[in-house]
Image (cartoon, helix red, strand yellow):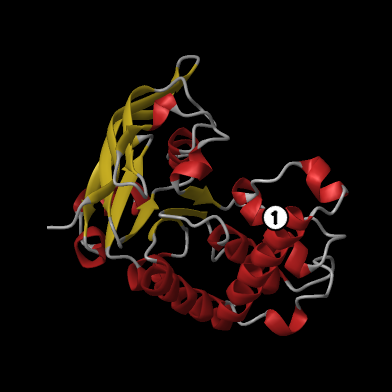
Amino acid sequence: MKNKVLELDRVTMQFGGLKAVNELSFSVDEGEIVGLIGPNGAGKTTVFNCVTQFYDDYQGNIFFTNHQNERIDLRSKKVTEVIDEGIVRTFQNVELIPDLSILDNVMIGAHNQFKTNIFAHILRTKKAKQEETMIREKAMEVLEFMNILDIKDQFAHGQPYGILKKIEIARTLMANPKLIILDEPAAGLNDKETDELAEIINNIRENYNASILLIEHDMGFVMEICDRVCAINFGQYLAMGSPKEIQSHPDVQEAYLGKDE
């Protein structure tokens, strides 16, 4: 039996009189790829924001098993500390610095690993230079893994959207993730790029020993890549199971297709 890396226990997030998430419980196992699906407005991104502590006033509990195999209550962590525990995420809108090179954008992903302070880097101390060299070498390895090392010195600005997505995912790998949260990773990609993304995500699981939790509206992509799928609607749990089980589940079909009268 695999260990749980993430556990949501009766999580509720309310905005005024609206419950965006309502007593939601599900888990992600180590080495597992889990999809979180639901119609628009179902509360999926709110769930991500609770896990990463962008929202910290939710009810219920969210537990995470970090690299030290410690089961921690994420509520005890600030949003800036979550990444240190091993949780990284991407966003629906790609967040890159257009005037930096691809390599520099990826190196930013390791900001939590720098031990020397900003003054050491300004003064170019020996320790700071050694640290930067180590991070740069790691970024080169990640870019090679993502098959974009040959364009490392090009600016992020003007790159095709599929490349921007790769850069963003590459940046998450710099943070030594144990759980990667992907918010609509296939959005805006063509069929070829979507197939390549599926391969990349599987390779990340195998090569970086990371679990993956993703939101995605492309149901073909979700059903192909995920080990299990959790379906929600209006913030409430509908079902969780294999892709095949979820596809045939009557409550999921009703949420997406409506109920026949």
Rendered location of residue 104, percent (x, y): 76, 63
Residue 261 in sight here: no
Q: How many marks?
A: 1
Q: Quadrant of the N terminus?
A: bottom left
Residue shown at the point (29%, 57%) measured from the top left: 229
Kind of residue indicated by mark 1: Ile
In the rendered view, tell whether residue 203 sits above or below residue 121: below
Q: Dot 1, how many residues are within 10 Å of its Cα: few (below 14), some (14-19), or many (20+)?
A: some
Residue shown at the point (87%, 48%) measured from the top left: 122
Q: In the rendered view, does 222 fall on the left or right side of 78?
A: left
Residue at the top extreme of this rendering: 16
Residue 146 in sight here: yes
**Corner quadrant of residue 140:** bottom right
Rendered location of residue 260, percent (x, y): 26, 50
Q: In the rendered view, does 98 fall on the left or right side of 224?
A: right
Rendered location of residue 148, percent (x, y): 67, 80
- Asked whether 201 or 172 is in front, the reply is 172
Which residue is disc 1 drawn over?
Answer: 108
Q: In the rendered view, does 251 fall on the left or right side of 215?
A: left
Rendered location of residue 49, percent (x, y): 50, 36
Q: Secondary structure at mark 1?
A: helix
In the rendered view, tell whether residue 256 sits above or below residue 224: above
In the rendered view, tell whether residue 3 sits above or below residue 195: above
Residue shown at the point (76%, 68%) measured from the top left: 102
Q: In the rendered view, does 70 fall on the left or right side of 177?
A: left
